[in-house]
Structure formats: C-alpha cells, structure tokens
Amino acid sequence: MPLGLFALAMAAFAIGTTEFVIVGLIPEMARDLSVSLPTTGLLVSLYALAITLGAPTITALTGRLPRRGLAIGLMSIFIVGNLIAAFAPGYGLLLFGRIVTGVAHGVFFSIGATVATALVERSRSAQAVAVMFAGLTVAMVVGVPFGTFIGQHFGWRAPFLAVAALGAISLVGLTTLLPKTIPHAPPAGLSSQFALLAKPRLLILYLITVFGFGGSFVVFTYLSPLMTSVTRVTEAAVSLALMLFGLATVIGNLVGGRLADRLGTRRALTLVLIGLALSLTTLPFAASHVGAMFVNLFAWGVFAFALSPIVQAGVVATAETEAPDAVGTASGFNIAAFNLGIAAASSVGGLLVAGPGLLATPWAALVAVLVALALVQRIRATA
C-alpha cells in the first residue's frame, strides 16, 4: 500500500480520538469550566451536528478544489480547532473550537475515501479504504482511553494538545506522501445530493442509523459520570472501561460485517437490534455492580457497533441499484446520519441528566432502539 494511505490513517486516528476523548472527561471539564454536565455534553452533540451539516454542504462547495490541497487545508483547520479548544479561557471559545474541528472532520472523511481509492489500483480500492478507516478503529481502542488517561492526570486540555500534535504529524505525512495530483470526479450539487433522501429504502436505512446507532449516545456521552456516581469506580477505571468498549467496537464491526453477508440486511439488523435492546434493558440494573457493568458495557459495545457495517452495506447495495451514479454521496449521507444520531441522542441525554438523572438515560436509548427495530420491519424481507 502507498505510504500516503498511512498518512490518511494517522489523520483518521487523530480525528477519531478528538471526537470522543472528552466522553471520559466530562465531569472534570464541567467542574473546571463551572458549567453543568448537560452543558458540557453539548461539546459532543454540537461537534456531531457540525459534522452532519458541514460534511455535505462544504464538500459540495469545495468539489472542484484539488484533493491534495484540500486534505492538507482541512488537517490544518483541524489542528487550529484543537489548539483553540486547548487554550480556550472559557466554555464559549472551547465550543467554537469544537465546531470548527467538527466541520473539518466531516469534510475530511467525505473526501478521504475517494483520495484513498485514487492512490491504488481499482482492484485494491476496498483495501485502501479499510487502511484509512483502521485509524478510526485504533482511535476507539487506544486513542480515546489513552487520551482520557492523559486528561485525568494532566488536565482536560492536555488531550487537545496531544491530538493537535498528532494532527501536525499527519499534516507532515499528507504534505510529503500524497501525490501532487489526485484524480477525482466533482461531487454532485446539493440538490442532487438531497434528492437521495426521497428514496424510501435509503431514508429508512438512514433513520435506522439515527435511532439505532445514535440512541446509544444518550448513555455513552454521560458514561463517565454514570460510572463514577452509580457504579462507584474511580476515574482511572473509566479509562479501562473505555478501552473495553473500544475493543468491543472492533469485534462488533467484524461480527456485523459477517452477519450482513450471511443473513442479509433485514435479518442481520433485527438480530443486532434485539441484542442491543437487551443490553440497554439490563444496563440500569448492572450499573450498581462493577463486574456486571463491565460485562454489560462489552456486550453493549459489540451490538451497537455491529450496526454500522450492516447499515453501510445496505446503503451501498441500495444505491448501486437505485442511484448507481451517487453511491459515494449515499454513503456520505449515512455518515451524516451517524452524527445526527449522536448529536440528537447526546442532547436528549443532557436533558435527562438535568431532570430525572443518569439512570434514565438507558431507558431513553432503549426507546430509540425500539424505534429502529420497528423501522427494520419496513424493509422488504428480500433485502
């Protein structure tokens, strides 16, 4: 594989780390910034919303720019956004830095797959995309828990500085390793992109992503205060919990891909969503027992992230049949749906934490998963 792919993977690692690293630091950030837990949670939800809104619009507006220069520019903006967050004197500027970073994140991944495939022969395009997205997987297993560990020992600003350093390394790699010219087809205009939402099957799959995958973030966004307040573990143990959850996401991705191949989209989604619903149902009862909580956390992570490859495979298969000239755009909308789900769910989680309390979050996540399960039944059995 060309070395440029590993520069893309490093960038994906930095981006994946910065999106979720604050999940383990929310209590500390809330104390230091003198804001509530729900207000701190907006740093997750508005980041995801910036990805959702920024990815399709900015990608379309920059469609004719050279890919190499655009990737380098986006990584530069990503670094600046993290530095703003690291040195922000107050909550407002920190939130601004997160939004800037989120926009860069969304557009980078919108163009990243096409850049990766342009670096290799057509027969190796899937492998090239897998190498790039491996950075995200490693971020969930290593980057997020290690960043949380750094934040707990050196202050919550330290992970943003570390991610900015990773971004700088990625920037050097992108500058030196990407070819001067990267061929690409300009993406469709905004009107053509949004026309995909009128296709019922694609719309159902996107909604399954919003409710099924996104629903977990009602709880996940506030996992750290849940575990320190209810499970009664130390903040250091939260890092271990995030590492366990990250490992579960890797297994979930592998399991989901195999289930999609063997059972088809509809049956695979039904099986995984039932498993996710059961894990969320038992979560409030397991939360007060350390061992049970860790077991439940692992099962939850497997089922939640098994959804991603199943839905993505369904979106690609549907687009190849119904909109063969817009497969990339259809996939991009699914990424936007992931982040829309995260934004909405973490916002709902904030309202629940401010009202009924932390233990209400798993029940709200369960309701979202049951909505997704009902949507699956609208997919034809032949899917």
Image (cartoon, rainbow, N blue to C red):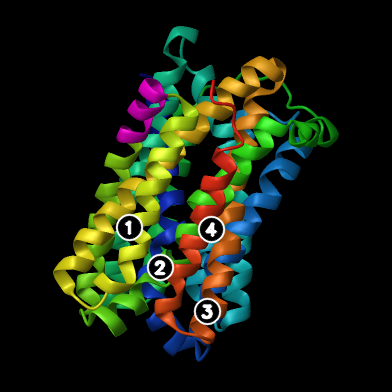
Res 195 → quadrant: top right
- Would residue 278 be counted in the magenta stretch? no
**Residue tagged 3:** 352
- Front tag of 2 and 3: 3
Tell me the residue at 29%/76% (across/down): 227
Residue 262 in magenta?
Answer: yes
Residue pointed to by mark 1:
279
Instruction: Look at label 1 and name its amino acid.
Output: Ser
Residue 23: assigned label = 2
Contact (CB < 8 A) between labels 2 and 3? no
Sequence order check, earlier mark of 2 and 4: 2
- Labels 2 and 3: the sequence-earlier one: 2
Label 4 sits on a secondary structure element that is helix
| Label 4: few (<14), some (14–19) or many (≥20) C-alpha neighbours in 10 Å | many
Q: Secondary structure at mark 1?
A: helix
Figure quadrant of residue 45: bottom right
Q: Amino acid at mark 4?
A: Ala
Residue 85: x, y in percent? Answer: 52, 70
**Measured along the vertical axis of the image, is residue 181 above or below residue 222?**
above
Q: Is residue 146 left or right of residue 353?
A: left
Q: Residues within 10 Å of mark 3 (few under 14, many from 20)?
A: some
- Residue range in magenta is 254-263
For marks 2 and 3, give the CA distance: 16 Å
Q: Which residue is mark 4?
A: 368
The image shows residue 298 at horizontal and vertical percentages of 25, 55
Left or right of 201 in this view: 39 = left
Look at label 3 and name its amino acid.
Answer: Leu
Mark 1 neighbour class, 10 Å CA radius: few under 14, some 14 to 19, many 20 or more:
many
Counting other residues with Cα less than 10 Å from the Cα at mark 2, is it few (<14), some (14-19), or many (20 or more)? Answer: many
Q: Considering depth in this image, is 76 or 376 the residue closer to the camera? A: 376
CA–CA distance in space, label 4 to label 1: 13 Å
